[in-house]
Image (cartoon, rainbow, N blue to C red):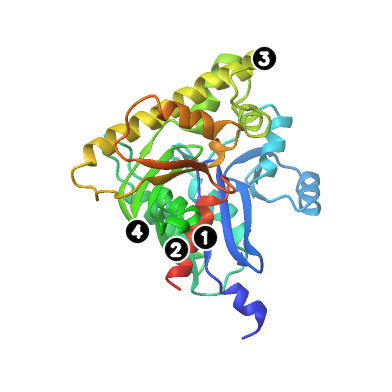
Amino acid sequence: MSKNDKNRNTPIGLDVGTSRIVTARQAEQGFACESQLNAFVSIPHSRMTESALSREHVPHVVEGGSIVVHGNESERFADLLHTELRRPMTRGLLNAGEPDSFKLILQIAGSMLGEVPSGQKVCFTVPAAPLDAEQDLTYHEATLRQILTEMGCEASSINEGLAVIYSELADTNYTGIGVSCGGGLCNVCFAYLSVPVLSFSIPKAGDFIDASAASVSGELANRIRTLKEESFFLNGHFPDKLHQVLGVYYDEMIRAVVAGMREAFAAANRRAPKVVRPIPLVLSGGSALPKGFRERFEKILQEGEFAVPLSDIRLAADPLTSTAKGALVAALSEA
């Protein structure tokens, strides 16, 4: 087998998030990751536009009288047309309001995975059930598995919070708490020696911040997300009203996650393994990107008691790709 064939058959980690789809592969120097927005926008069809998009290698498909631009380029067109992006997923799950969600995820994931050999091992992420809520995640997981199977992949799944632990906590033998602050959900997992003991999700996440700030400011949620990830920082001193609004809703999201953690860990204290030494908590996900997020999270967590002693609260080395890397670690462990 040639070196290229070996690389093509190397397992892939796939983070299928509400906001982004991220792939992780092994590389000579660690990991190679790629990210695309899990979003699309429809523009009027013309042969001239279709030809121009093809020449610029902009991912798109023709649907009737429209051209559907998906992935990262969809954001540019949504901004130009002053319209909101459409999303194949919402709140961590397939968007029932978008009948073509299956097809769009297939398009976006397919463009990232490329031509894969039959039996290509792919480990994909799935969210945990919301805290104190009954929700069947079977359809979502089965549909993602079907998408990958149709590509010829051999698919397995991993809890999103556990993937963060696999990615970031090798130094504690995969014992600790992983928190993935994504677009649709914040996922939390506590693992002991890589075994998931407790996992749940909180519905207040990045999309909640974007939509709430957009409703107050009158700005598009697309632009709120870009501002949030590129120039916003949590330091308590905000240069304008929009930054102040973002600070308010970031605090609300963090407090919801911390309150959920306190409730879940207190309830599970009797059946959870007794932790003999303090354990780390690691934060990841696109909503954890703003500067000062870790410090703000730590300050709010320290305002009250917590059932598990923590050694430190750390930020993932690359919050945006951490979950995909953890999925790859899981895939490699089974290869």
In primary-sequence order, the first of circles 2 and 1 is: 1
Frontmost of labels 4 and 1 is 4
Tag 2 secondary structure: helix
Q: CA distance from mark 4 to mark 3?
A: 46 Å
Frontmost of labels 4 and 3 is 4
Residue ranking furthest to the front: 277
Amino acid type at image mark 3: Asp
The answer to whether the residue labelled 3 contacts the one labelled 1, judged by CB atoms less than 8 Å apart, is no
Circle 4 crowding by C-alpha within 10 Å: few under 14, some 14–19, many from 20: few
Q: Quickly name the residue at label 3.
A: 240
The answer to whether the residue labelled 2 contacts the one labelled 1, judged by CB atoms less than 8 Å apart, is yes
Image-based side of 296 in relation to 54, left or right? left
The answer to whether the residue labelled 4 contacts the one labelled 3, judged by CB atoms less than 8 Å apart, is no
Q: Quickly name the residue at label 1.
A: 13
Frontmost of labels 4 and 2 is 4
Circle 2 crowding by C-alpha within 10 Å: few under 14, some 14–19, many from 20: many
Q: Residue 222 appears at what percent x and percent y? A: 62, 30
Q: Quickly name the residue at label 4.
A: 193
In primary-sequence order, the first of circles 4 and 1 is: 1
Q: Quickly name the residue at label 2.
A: 330
Frontmost of labels 3 and 1 is 3
Residue 178 showing in the rendered view:
no
In primary-sequence order, the first of circles 3 and 2 is: 3
The answer to whether the residue labelled 4 contacts the one labelled 1, judged by CB atoms less than 8 Å apart, is no
Amino acid type at image mark 1: Gly
